[in-house]
Image (tube, rainbow, N blue to C red):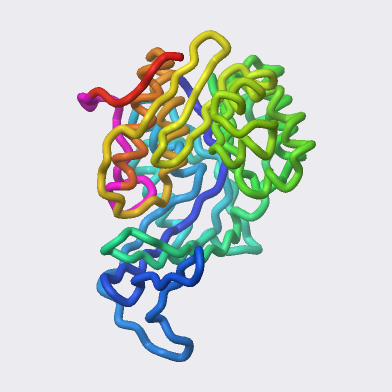
Amino acid sequence: MARIVSLGSALQDIYLIDHDDFAPTKIGNDAIFGKVLVGGKVDIDKLSYEVGGGGINSAITFARHGHEAIFMGNIANDPAGHAIQRVLDRESIDSSYIDFVDKNSTGTSVIMLDSRGGERTILTHRGASEKFNNFDENDLDLIQPDWLYITTLRGDFDTLSRFIRKAKSLGVKIMFNPGVREFDDIKTLTKLISDIDILNVNKTEAARIVPGVLLTELLYHLNNYVETVIITDGPMGGIAGNRIDTYRFGIYEDARVKDATGAGDAFGSGFLAHLAGGKSFRSSLIFASANSTSVVSKIGANRGILTGKEQLHPMPIQKL
């Protein structure tokens, strides 16, 4: 098995779950929670305290798969931070590279979830996970990982560059799943991805980096920058290629979505967890899809994460 560093955010997720008050009301092409009135009081059916964030979700996937998982991120010495620490301990994730931030609270999300349809609205205070410039890339010398898995660093390209350069100098392979803030500077993002091994983006994000409309076009152009590219397209599945093999894949199964939080993290980290365990490119895509499907079938961003030992059924996947 591999040693994998997850660099990214850590959040406490507080779920407000209700079966009728959060029912969406359509307004044009959008929807709002129609029964929550300003100045009103709403009785919630259920409250659930979870943990999440891209760094945490991915580390849990790697640990459950049997890899040596190391989480690198910021939390505070507060109840939310303690909850995250307990989960890391429970999942046997190395937390020795956590930085405890004194001047901010642990990042927290309040998630308003409609239990009937699975629609949600997320109110997030990034807190300690807002910035990452306190981390030292030279810690990779001590860790000596096989892989560095990076989720969004909130557009902190300086920290991204430092860690990518260091990883490259050590021969560490890199997978990157950028977030919204990274796409605020496409020019810098494009330069960075040339130094990574695996890029995981959705179709809309891919079209912001390279020209193209069809998934095959986008993959072809992105493969000029990155050896292995995965482009997801929601319920339509996605496409992936490593300059040797290209696969067009659908969803693992048509499961009822209870909560879509963490679906992207589950897919990306699921792919790497399987691949780093010596599995094939094709089977890693299948596991990634199964991991994502399992996560959205439960409430919470990581309760449904698989171990890699499950017996998976066939899914739509075609070699192009």
Query: Which residue occupies 50% across, 44% down?
Result: 54
Kindly identify the residue that appears in the image at 65 percent across and 31 percent down.
212
Residue 78's x, y, as percent? 49, 63
The answer to whether residue 305 is magenta is yes
Q: Quadrant of residue 34?
A: bottom left
Residue 207 drawn in magenta: no
Image quadrant where residue 66 sits: top left
In front here: 155 or 60?
A: 155
Report the magenta stretch's main SS: loop
Tell how many labels: 0
Q: Quadrant of residue 120?
A: bottom left
Q: Please provide the residue range marked out in magenta.
A: 297-313
Is 104 on the left-hand or right-hand side of 25? right
Residue at left offset 48%, top offset 87%: 38
Q: In the picture provided, is 310 more to the left or to the right than 209?
A: left
Give me the residue at 73% from left, 25% from top: 165
**Quarter placement of the N terminus:** top left
In the rendered image, the vertical position of residue 62 relative to residue 261, given as above or below: above
On the image, the x and y values in percent for residue 108 come to: 50, 62
- Front-most of 93 and 260? 260
Residue 165 visible? The answer is yes
Residue 134 visible in the snapshot: no
As drawn, is 55 to the left or to the right of 159?
left
- Residue 133 in the image, given as x and y percentages of width and height: 72, 46
Residue 230 x %, y %: 52, 27
Looking at the image, residue 139 sits to the left or right of residue 312; the answer is right
